[in-house]
Image: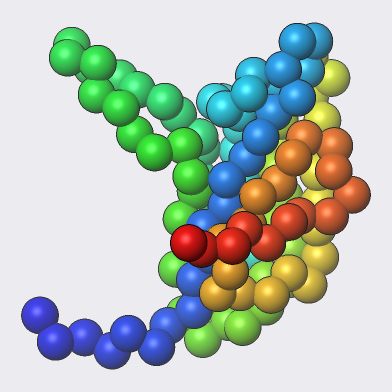
Amino acid sequence: NQTDQRANWTRIRLKGNGAGASNGAAIGAKVIVTTAIGSQMREVNGGYGHFGMQNTTDAHFGLGDACVMDKVEVHWPNAEHTVSVYHNVPANYPLVIQEKAEFPEYETIQ
């Protein structure tokens, strides 16, 4: 396949605080990314099925021409139903969001 590879993207890894908060892998969390084009939602799930299929817990988003995410919203799977909201987050970086963190962190690719 010959396709244009210049589209923008992000990968978001969530980290729950555990013990009394969200589980460490944030399974059950919902991530909503909003750009000028619209909104996309991913739900973090671990595995499923008869043979214990495992999925990545990272949420991947294709952002098209959007260089900035207007809003990143995380609905955490905790008893308080905490929602974290971040505005004007740059695209094209893998992010790590810790539960109740003030800002997302940019993950370095090794």
> Which residue: 63% across, 40% down?
14
> Which residue: 49% across, 71% down?
9
Residue 43 position, x and y percent, is 51, 37
Residue 80 position, x and y percent, is 84, 19
User: Relative to residue 32, is residue 64 drawn left or right?
Assistant: left
Compared with 10, 105 (above or below) is: above
The reply to whether residue 88 is visible in this rendering is yes
User: Relative to residue 80, is residue 50 drawn left or right?
Assistant: left
Residue 36 position, x and y percent, is 64, 78
Compared with 109, 46 (above or below) is: above
Quadrant of the snapshot with the N terminus = bottom left
Q: How are the residues colored?
A: rainbow
Residue 27, by quadrant, is top right
Residue 86, by quadrant, is bottom right
Residue 90 position, x and y percent, is 69, 75
> Which residue: 61% across, 28% down?
26
User: Relative to residue 62, is residue 71 drawn left or right?
Assistant: right
Residue 66, by quadrant, is bottom right
